[in-house]
Image (tube, rainbow, N blue to C red):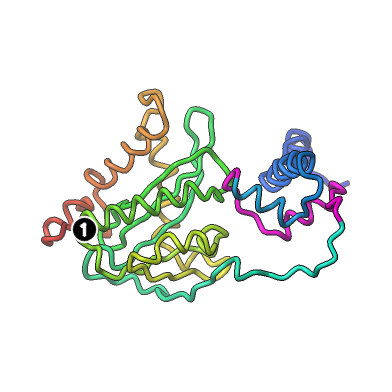
Amino acid sequence: MNVSRSGYYKWVKNKDILNAYEQNRMDLGKLIKDIHKKKPSYGYRRINAIIRTETGWYVSNNLVHKVCRLLKIWSKAKHYSKYKNPGEESIKYPNLINNNWDVNKPFEKNASDTTCIWFKKRKYDWTYYIDVFDNSIVGSDIKPFYYGVNMTNHKSALENMLDNKIKRGYKDQDTIFHSDQGSIYSSATFNSYHQDYNIIRSMSRIATPTDNPVIESKNGWFKKEIYIDFNQDDYDNVNDYINDIIYDHNYFRPAYALKYKTPIQFRTELGFN
């Protein structure tokens, strides 16, 4: 079959291991089966609404519909009225940053993303916010791994960022908040959380991580450095672990972009809170 020896044994080793996409579908299928068993009259849209409410896992109605069809699950009740979409489920914003990351003071431009980390053999979703002015982490939350679509995780990280913005005296300042077009960042529910906080939204183009290089580069070296510099055996829980990483990053890690000053040192020397 013209397959190399190493390639064959790699296939043998991994053929029974589910990738993230397959595991995602399997976990979603289990939730759908449980809800359908309890409420056989529910259709895929209502099933998805229950999944969002009870787990915070945001997936599209289309995906739930596909999994329902694969599982041969459908509503036991026959509905005669035509479904009408009650409103827009997601909101897409233009790319206001357009790779212009120049800033003059804190909280002019913030960027956010979710990355996965391991802590004592368990996987977590870490959502955090970076202030482009000094590269400091100004908002953060970590929750058990849920494919980056945990609404509670995103809401807590956002609230943490907004609290810091207010405490430091920037409540009335407009802040451009840049993110990708992920299902949480573009959801109407998430956007309602910051509508009263002078937040102006900006989004990267689809499948264009280079539109958000500030956060993407952070994700890369975070995963390299934290496992080397922070011994997980020294921590009882993941929250203490992340808080220590954030404190070290903000107060002690010199950055090339800041002329090898730490984020706190850089902004305080310029007279900002």
Q: Is residue 5 visible?
A: no
Q: Name which residue lies at 51% across and 60% down.
A: 189
Give the residue displayed 80% in from the left and 70% down from the top. 82
- Residue found at the very far front of the displayed protein: 80
Q: In terms of depth relative to the viewer, which is nearer, 254 or 248?
A: 248
Question: Relative to residue 254, is residue 229 drawn left or right?
Answer: right
Question: Mark 1 highlights which residue?
Answer: 259
Q: Quadrant of residue 162?
A: bottom left
Please state the horizontal and vertical placement of residue 34, each as a whole percent of the image.
74, 38
Q: Is residue 267 visible?
A: yes
Numbered disc 1: secondary structure: loop
**Image spot of residue 27 (x, y percent):** 70, 41
Give the camera-side residue of 104 and 25: 25
Question: Residue drawn at (84%, 48%), measured in percent from left and top?
Answer: 73
**72 lies above or below 179:** above
The C terminus is located in which quarter? Answer: bottom left
Q: Position of residue 123 (x, y in %)?
A: 54, 36
Judge whether residue 23 is colored magenta.
no
Q: Mark 1 is on which residue type?
A: Lys
- Horizontal relation, residue 206 to residue 176: left or right: right
How far across and down, in percent of the image, does residue 247 sit?
27, 41
Residue located 42% across and 76% down the image? 96
Mark 1 Cα-neighbour bin, 10 Å: few <14, some 14–19, many ≥20? few
Residue stretch rendered in magenta on the structure: 54-77
Q: Is residue 69 magenta?
A: yes
Q: Nearer the viewer, residue 9 or 133?
A: 133
